[in-house]
Image (cartoon, grey):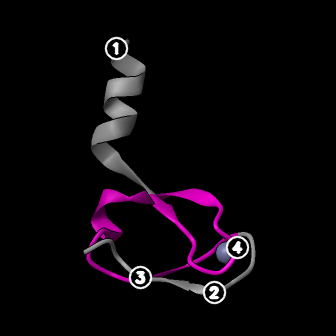
Amino acid sequence: MNPIVAMFAVFYRKRTCPKCKRDQVVPASKRLESVHCKFCGADVPPRK
Ligand SMILES: [Zn+2]
C-alpha cells in the first residue's frame, strides 16, 4: 500500500448510504456520528 493511501485509510472511513447505496468517505472524527449522504441527503448511521 502506498503511503498516501495508508494516510487516507487512517483518517477517513468509507460508509455506504442505506438509501442510495453509494459509498462515501467519512472523516474518522465523525465515525461515531450519523452524517448526511452527500448524494441524496439521507442520514447515514455509523457502522455497528
Ligand atoms: Zn444516499
Q: What residue type is labelled 2?
A: Ala
Q: In this view, does 32 lie to the left or right of 2?
A: left
> Between tags 2 and 4, which lies in front?
4
What SS does tag 4 mark?
loop
Q: Is label 1 within 8 A of ligand 1 (CB to nearest ligand atom)?
A: no
Is there CB contact under 8 Å for labels 3 and 1? no
Segment colored magenta = 15-38
Q: Is label 2 within 8 A of ligand 1 (CB to nearest ligand atom)?
A: yes
What SS does tag 1 mark?
loop
Q: Which residue is drawn at 63% across and 86% down?
A: 42
Which residue is tagged 2?
42
Which residue is tagged 1?
1
Quadrant position of the C terminus in the picture = bottom left
Q: Which of 27 and 19 is in front in this view?
A: 19
Q: How many labels does the image show?
A: 4
x and y percent of residue 17 in the render? 57, 72
